[in-house]
Amino acid sequence: MDSTEFSQIRRHLGKTQAQIARLLGVSTKAIQSFEQGWRNVPAHSERQLLFLLYLKSLPDAGCEPCWDKRSCPLKARKECPAWEFKAGNLCWFINGTLCEGKVQQNWQKKMQLCRQCKVFISLIPAFK
């Protein structure tokens, strides 16, 4: 996540730097550093920020789960944590999900795929 994206999401959430700092459990100086591009946004902060964005605009209850949208085979579904925990709209949030048939190496690699995925794009308003 780059500094511009971080700032846009914070503003979309309607939060000041101090408010988002409290929500993410970091200092206001850290938020300023993220937004100025002086520091990279850590994976745990990015994850939390995206989760808050998701919660702010929850999809309707009838939203199709990721495994249906992506037509995942039953074998892959049974091995995927999103399926196991019935979290078809949070596949992007859960580490260890089987994106493109395999577990991604880390959060950054996973998010590279998620940002191009129709499931993620449909759920996270800033990316529509």
Image (cartoon, rainbow, N blue to C red):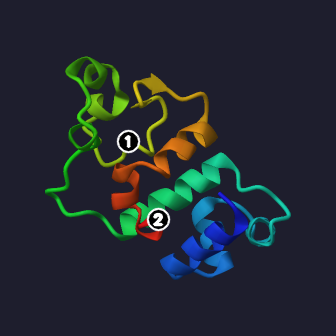
Q: Quadrant of residue 36?
A: bottom right
Q: Mark 1 packing: few (<14 Cα in 10 Å), some, or many (20+)?
A: many
* Residue visible at 57% across and 80% down in the picture: 11
Q: Give, as a three-letter code, the residue at label 2.
A: Phe
Of label 2 and label 1, which has the lower sequence position? Answer: 1
Which residue is tagged 1?
91
Q: Give, as a three-letter code, the residue at label 1.
A: Cys
Residue 119 x %, y %: 34, 50
From this view, report whether residue 106 is shown above or below residue 69. Answer: above
| Label 2 to label 1: alpha-carbon separation | 16 Å
**Quadrant the C terminus occupies:** bottom left
From this view, report whether residue 115 is shown above or below residue 85. Answer: below
Q: Which-is-in-front pick, marks 2 and 1?
A: 2
Which residue is tagged 2?
127
User: Residue 100 got which mark?
Assistant: none
* Residue visible at 65% across and 59% down in the picture: 25
Residue 94 x %, y %: 44, 39
